[in-house]
Amino acid sequence: MAIKKFDHFSILAKKPEEVIEFYSKFLGYSLKYKKEIPLMHMNVFMLENNGELMEIIQPTGTDIKMSDGLKHIAFLSDDIEADFKDFVEKGAQMLHTEIQRSGDISFFFAKSPSGEMVEVIQHP
């Protein structure tokens, strides 16, 4: 297994400003960047506190059926191909049939038995 450590967790929020204010005010997170992703119908806000990352996703499309709250937890890999193969061979409930790529980031998602999404991600 090439998974090295926890990478980030992701929260879906229709009103991200309120969530950002909460985590800033009470837990010391600050906004690292905001990224608009029109093709995926979302805005992404990345917060950071002492090197720990939190991703807040704001849906921008009217077809989003998910409710606010925890979306996924992510773990950092240094060999995404090996981890993907390991998850498939061990029978994980995969959301993708192949590794996804966006720029220099590679990732895939699986669903745990309790329902949360687990992302395995590799980035520079």
Image: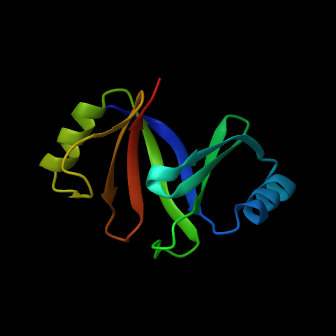
Snapshot quadrant of residue 75:
top left
Q: Nearer the viewer, residue 44 or 68?
A: 44
Q: In what quadrant of the picture does the N terminus appear?
A: top left
Give the residue drawn at x 63%, y 43%: 53
Q: Which of 67 and 3 is in front in this view?
A: 67
Give the residue drawn at x 37%, y 27%: 78
Q: Is residue 7 left or right of residue 78?
A: right
Q: Image height check: is 76 above or below 54?
A: above
Give the residue drawn at x 70%, y 61%: 16
Snapshot quadrant of residue 79:
top left
Residue at the outermost left position: 89
Give the colour scheme shown.
Answer: rainbow
Give the total number of marks visible in the rendering. Answer: 0
- Rendered location of residue 23, percent (x, y): 77, 57
Give the residue drawn at x 55%, y 52%: 9
- Rendered location of residue 12, percent (x, y): 57, 64
Q: Image height check: is 36 above or below 77?
A: below
Q: Which of 37 and 48 is in front in this view?
A: 37
Q: Is residue 1 left or right of residue 6?
A: left
- Rendered location of residue 117, percent (x, y): 40, 60
Residue at the outermost top position: 124
Q: Is residue 24 left or right of residue 2?
A: right
- Rendered location of residue 27, percent (x, y): 80, 53
